[in-house]
Amino acid sequence: MSGCFQSPDRDFDDAAHVQCRSAGQDCQAEISSDELAGIYNESLRQRGDLTIWVKDEALSLWTARRRTSRGGQPKYSDLAITLCLTLRVVYGLALRQTQGLMRSVAALMGFDIALPDFSTQSRRSKGLALPSTKSRAITSGPVHLVVDSTGLKVLGEGEWLENKHKTKAKRKRWRKLHLGLNLVSGEIVCSDLTADDVGDPTALPGLLDQIGGPVEKFIADGAYDGTPTRDLLATRFGEIVEVIIHLPRLPLPALNRCWFHLSAIAILQKSRPKGGWHGRNPPCYNKRSRAETQMGRWKAVIGPKLKARHFDNEKTEAKIGVRVLNRMTELGRPKFERLA
């Protein structure tokens, strides 16, 4: 028997699916600003809508399959652990609070199932195999990839305490989150969590391994500038890939000391219009800024800190955060249909 626990205050079913009719005839109509505002507001309301639907097959897969190898038998499946950890990331809960939330949801839905405790969630989070999801990038054609990275703080005083008071930090310091955004579909198609001393070009091969389709355009900032990055892209996707790397704004004497930047600036000067770039920004700067916006969205929705204590658990937490943002993006993007 399937169960559904849904918040009662949904204004309407699907305002993001718009059909335009005028004067009793099917036609293509312009959508007014008020209608666009209503669609946008409804998409934001859907991001906060609480709907938990558990299918029969999900309940049947709640317990883990019995394995034939040596060792203890797992009690809960990866799907059950993933569900618990996803709710933890969405609501920013601790493990004990996550266990209490799952217990309340099961009671409201009338499910008589065993729930993993907080220690089981922490232990199983290490190296957890997340269920596969269908990526929209596969059906949206070539990928327009923009990559960037940001730092995520691990809870604790960190390096300031160690440098100021010569005291060993109780927790680790920073982790570096690398994200690759597909400008066509708006979803994160590749991600990785590394130590803070791993450079962006070093993490790039691992990001490209996660992309199954062709990449038509690659956009990044000056951290990815260099021959190794261009050779890697040409090897993976051929010479047809368009590489756009924005150089950092350095003083002229610093640029004169770097021969590679001189050649890059010469190429940019040839493509620069007569009146210069508006706002002193090179081409596709607004597209690259979407990666920076995605980083800000991560820290606003998921949070600027990692809750897990061990690196393997932190990598699982980052992967779940990517799935959560992609799901919110799918719910928050309106769909327009043209009626002839």
Image (cartoon, helix red, strand yellow):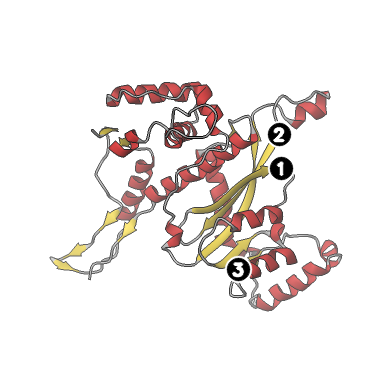
Regarding mark 3 in the picture, which secondary structure is present there? loop
Asked if marks 2 and 3 touch (Cβ < 8 Å), the reply is no
Front tag of 1 and 3: 1
CB under 8 Å between callouts 1 and 2?
A: yes
Residue 224, horizontal then vertical, whole percent = 69, 59
- Kindly identify the amino acid type of the residue bearing the numbered disc 3: Pro
Q: Which residue in the structure is indicated by mark 2?
A: 173
Q: Would you name the residue on which mark 1 appears?
A: 196
- Determine whether, in the image, residue 10 is placed left or right of residue 144: left
Q: CA distance from mark 2 to mark 3?
A: 36 Å
Whether residue 51 is visible to the viewer of this picture, yes or no, is: no
Q: Give yes or no for contact between labels 1 and 3 (Cβ–Cβ under 8 Å).
A: no
Quarter of the figure with residue 279: bottom right
At a point 42% along the width and 33% down the height, the residue shown is: 64
Instruction: Give left or right: position of 296 versus 8.
Output: right
Residue 283 is marked as 3
